[in-house]
Image (cartoon, rainbow, N blue to C red):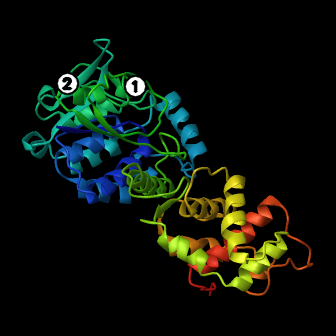
Amino acid sequence: MRGLILEGGGGKGAFHIGALKALYEAGYDFDFVAGTSIGAMNGALIAQNDFDVAVDWWEKLDTDKLFTFGEGEKSTASLFGGALRSIVFDGGLDTSKIHEILCEIINEDRLRASKIDFGMITISLTRRRPLELFKEDIPKGKLVDYLMASGNLPVFKSEPLDGEKFLDGSFYDNCPVNLALKRGCREVVVIRTYTMRPIKSYPKDGLSELIIKPDANLGTVLDFGRSTLKQNMSAGYCEAKRAMGLLRGETYFLDVKDNSLLFNALAALPDETAAQLASAFGFTMSDPKRTLFEIMIPEAARMLGVSSATYGDILISLMEHEAKKRGVPRFTVYGARAFAREVWTRRDVISYGFVTNNIMSPTGTMLQSKERFLSTLCDVFVNSLSEGEAPK
């Protein structure tokens, strides 16, 4: 059995949706899904076989669809100010809009009839203990209320549920892998959000895990701003594809299946260009192409900290290094040529005009600094890889 585990995290839950899009594209399906807080809400939609509804919901979601604040309080900093005022004067943030949305998108009958099992975490303050709930444990007609209980942060205004008060389950176990193990899953896909909440340890012997995790800041728990959610969904999609081994790159997400395109672009450089490179950096080998392959590329690898790598790995690292400096957007899946064009179009046309003229700097001095060497080498390469296409 394969289980899906969704870590809580408020607005970071958009990361789940992007990751799931990539997983479904790759042919994944699930026998069980569990989550905490927003992970439980997203998980319920998956368990009721309504991923398209989940996507539509997150694509339309914005702060004012969930909370009511004063004018100009939609920034992250203002949200916390508004939350504080709501706690002091109103007993907490009003979550009635969230309840209304869940009533629209959650289909309890469909979830209970689904072949996909479901579990969630909340905490009973009344009983002073955490609750690990499977769908048969949730009273009929109360699913939405228990999902709200799983996400009941201390800043939220809440009413007792059947005489009990509840707290967000993230304060007990924000990523409930143990629920999947109790249901017999020996394979789990875990989508993390890295919210600062406890996670219960679980036995890993004989367990197959695919862990999808962000390497960028997903914002705060209460950040449901449109731009943040859009970026989080894109990040989830890219990180899931990389976690499945479908993409290359350390910082960027590159759909480069083999190295031949990269190697051939480097090999296609005219001898004159290779000779200009060698001369500009003080290399004196008689064969400029051998100088490029045997000295300059290995030197670039050393500067980049890349060891035991193929030419393709070095060239990808070189492009990524320059892409970070030039502000190439991260959360997009790039083909090799598309990435090369993004790097090329953001070059410093004053400093690197050598690509279409000659390799010397405007003053005619030798280009000797580490960054100038890497930028020069990268520009020559990406110009060749992008088939010589200059930006329009």
Tell me the tag on residue 41. none
Question: Mark 2 sits on what residue?
Answer: 182
Q: Is residue 278 visible?
A: yes
Q: CA distance from mark 2 to mark 1?
A: 16 Å
Query: Which of the marked residues, 2 or 1, is nearer the chain's N terminus?
Result: 2
Q: Nearer the viewer, residue 316 or 271?
A: 271
Residue at (49% x, 34% y) in the render? 86
Name the secondary structure under disc 1.
loop
Q: Nearer the viewer, residue 214 or 155?
A: 214
Q: Is residue 324 above or below residue 124?
A: below
Question: Mark 1 sits on what residue?
Answer: 199
Q: Is residue 320 above or below residue 198?
A: below
Occupied quadrant, residue 278:
bottom right
Q: Measuring from the top left, give residue 296's x and y in whole percent.
A: 72, 65
Occupied quadrant, residue 386:
bottom right
Asked if disc 2 and disc 1 are in contact, CB closer than 8 Å, the reply is no
Residue sitting at the far front: 286
Q: Measuring from the top left, give residue 221's x and y in whole percent.
A: 47, 39
Left or right, 287 with respect to 59, comes to: right
Left or right, 74 with respect to 136, comes to: right
Q: Nearer the viewer, residue 281 or 129?
A: 281
Residue sitting at the far left: 113
Q: Residues within 10 Å of mark 2 (few under 14, many from 20)?
A: few
Name the secondary structure under disc 2.
helix
Q: Measuring from the top left, give residue 65's x and y in whole percent.
A: 39, 52
